[in-house]
Image (tube, grey):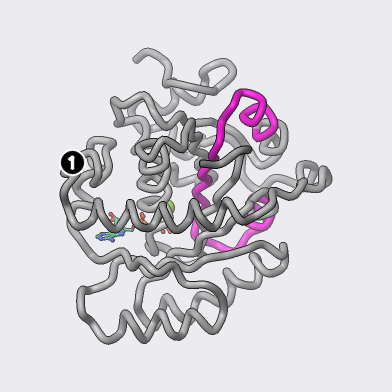
Amino acid sequence: MLSSMRVIVFTSQKGGSGKTTLSGHVAVQAELAGHGPVALIDTDPQGSLAAWWNARTAEAPVFVQTTVQRLFADLEELRARGIRLVVIDTPPAVTSTIRNVVAYADLVVIPTRPSPHDLRAVGATLDIVEGRNKPLVFVVNDATPRARITSDAAIALSQHGTVAPTTIHHRTDFASSMIDGRTVMECDAGSRSTVEIAELWTYLNARLQKIQPRPVPLYVAHERPTFGRHDATADVPGFAAMAQTAGTFGRRAAQ
Ligand SMILES: Nc1ncnc2c1ncn2[C@@H]1O[C@H](COP(=O)(O)OP(=O)(O)OP(=O)(O)O)[C@@H](O)[C@H]1O
Ligand SMILES: [Mg+2]
């Protein structure tokens, strides 16, 4: 159990590597494991995590609407409110947004599919994370069971950083469970995907406990923002209302 608030940032320059899927699953799993309260933040203008959360009926984790400019202040407020874990999803690009967000991470998780394209793209992500001198862990995601390329990918990644001992395999319930705002754990508590996520969180939690949270330099909060509010997702049903909610913490606005 974490004694103070920790921040996990899921990032990968490669699109479709599983950032959003794993952000949502890890946040819910941390709650299920009794390590909440957990807050989710979506810094991707695509707003996929926000849209997923908006489809949820469960109360936890909470979703926080923020911007890079406000991130420092909002994280401090979350800490004051007793949030113990913040999970931040990021967009698939190399932008100053990601650099600024990674600056707040206690641990950076880099989901990587076991494919040559994903492996080749890892360097750009590593540059950002290492530039901020942050602890990182790779998670091999969307792997085909028993495929040689999965272990080859893990070996290749291990030359650049720690690889989570749990591989997340390609399972359709990772996609289908998120349609109505749930996770694999909330659809079938006995599924193999549920076990994988539980093991992944156990590992990430252990890593987090060994990391001393470091103060974030204030100047980060004043760097020029590269995204605004989630206007790009204003067409998502219910999202616009949520974005306008005063204070923007907690549950969505009534629809
Ligand atoms: N382990 C998995 N098994 C099956 N499908 C998966 C798995 N992980 C991710 N997916 C699917 O792959 C697609 C991409 O996943 P996701 O949106 O989480 O990636 P992302 O890194 O957030 O993408 P982007 O870079 O566009 O933000 C989604 O359709 C998701 O449902
Ligand atoms: Mg995403």
Q: Which residues are magenta?
A: 75-101
Q: Secondary structure at mark 1?
A: helix
What is the count of numbered marks? 1
Find out whether residue 66 is within the magenta segment.
no
Nearer to us in this view, 218 or 222: 218
Density class for disc 1 (Cα within 10 Å; few <14, some 14-19, many ≥20) is some
Residue at horizontal 49%, vertical 51%?
205
Q: Amino acid at mark 1?
A: Cys
- Looking at the image, residue 51 sits to the left or right of residue 226; the answer is left
- Tell me what residue is drawn at x 44 percent, y 25 percent: 240
Residue 134 position in % (x across, y down): 67, 62
Q: Is residue 219 above or below residue 128?
A: above
Give the residue drawn at x 47%, y 39%: 232
Of residues 145 and 118, the one drawn nearer to the viewer in this rendering? 145
Which of the two residues, 20 or 138, is positioned nearer the viewer here?
138
Q: Position of residue 151 (x, y in %)?
A: 34, 83
Q: Quadrant of residue 179?
A: top left
Location of residue 198 with respect to 238 vertically, above or below: below
Residue occupying image coordinates x 38% and y 32%: 235
Give the percent coordinates (x, y) of residue 66: 59, 33
